[in-house]
Amino acid sequence: MKTTRKLFIFGLTFLALATNAHAQSPREQLNQMVQQLQKNPSDNALREKIIKLGARIRPALPDEAVRYTGRAMFIFNTAKREADYLDAAREYERAVASAPWRASYYADLCTIYEKAGKYAEAKRACDFALVGTTDSSQAIELKQRIAGLEIGVERNSVEAQAQRKQEEFAVFLKSIEGAVFQSDAEIGWIYKFRIEYGVLLKIAT
């Protein structure tokens, strides 16, 4: 009898919890997910869910988000160097943290990071902007931006920079092809060198 009663109470409790979860409104779901994301900002799958849900229910923006975007845009519009753009990005990241469902925030953040030369961060922001875009023309524009930023990431890699420096040095050597240089050592030895095919050759002592 006691076992039956316990099972009955457990069943009622489970049913009440299930009913409560089912009765949760989309806005309540969004608030709960935002709280989870703020604890774990690197959860990209959760962020995408938030963006999609936000695009559907269009919640009001928190005052905090509006304030941070205002601060970010002022810094961006008066920026004169890379560090200024990074300051603007930091302010905008705070706005995104306050309203992570706002697709347009990610698009703006993409622009700011691109200006700062942070192409990987810009691409990440553009990817999230694309998730929340419902307009087909905007989606095409974002895809083009993402493709361009991918090139920026490739060209900005350590390997690509080293390759460019190597190519620039080769061009420099070619520009002084045939030039002769003379070195007078302290001990009295004189060395002469000539550039041939990009190689420094000793031609006399």
Image (tube, helix red, strand yellow):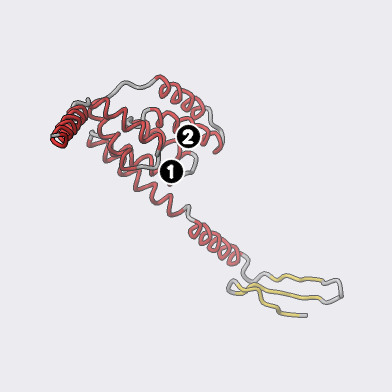
Vertical placement of residue 71 versus 40, above or below: above
Q: Nearer the viewer, residue 67 or 21?
A: 21
Q: Residue at x 42, y 28 (%)?
A: 95
Residue 195: x and y, percent?
A: 64, 72
| Element carrying mark 2 | helix
Q: Quadrant of the N terminus?
A: top left
For residue 22, what is the image quadrant?
top left
Residue 41: x and y, percent?
A: 40, 39
Task: Please indicate whether residue 80 sits to the left or right of residue 25 in the image.
Answer: right
Amino acid type, mark 2: Ala
Q: CA distance from mark 1 to mark 2?
A: 10 Å
Q: Marks 1 and 2: CB-CB under 8 Å?
A: yes
Residue 5: x and y, percent?
A: 15, 32
Vertical placement of residue 171 versus 123, above or below: below
Q: Which residue is mark 1?
A: 121
Q: Which residue is mark 2?
A: 89
For residue 48, what is the image quadrant?
top left
Q: Label for residue 31?
A: none
Residue 156: x and y, percent?
A: 48, 52
| Element carrying mark 1 | helix
Density class for disc 2 (Cα within 10 Å; few <14, some 14-19, many ≥20) is: many
Q: Residue at x 53, y 33 (%)?
A: 87
Task: Please indicate whether residue 88 sits to the left or right of residue 52 in the image.
Answer: right
Task: Please indicate whether residue 82 sits to the left or right of residue 105 in the image.
Answer: right
Amino acid type, mark 1: Glu
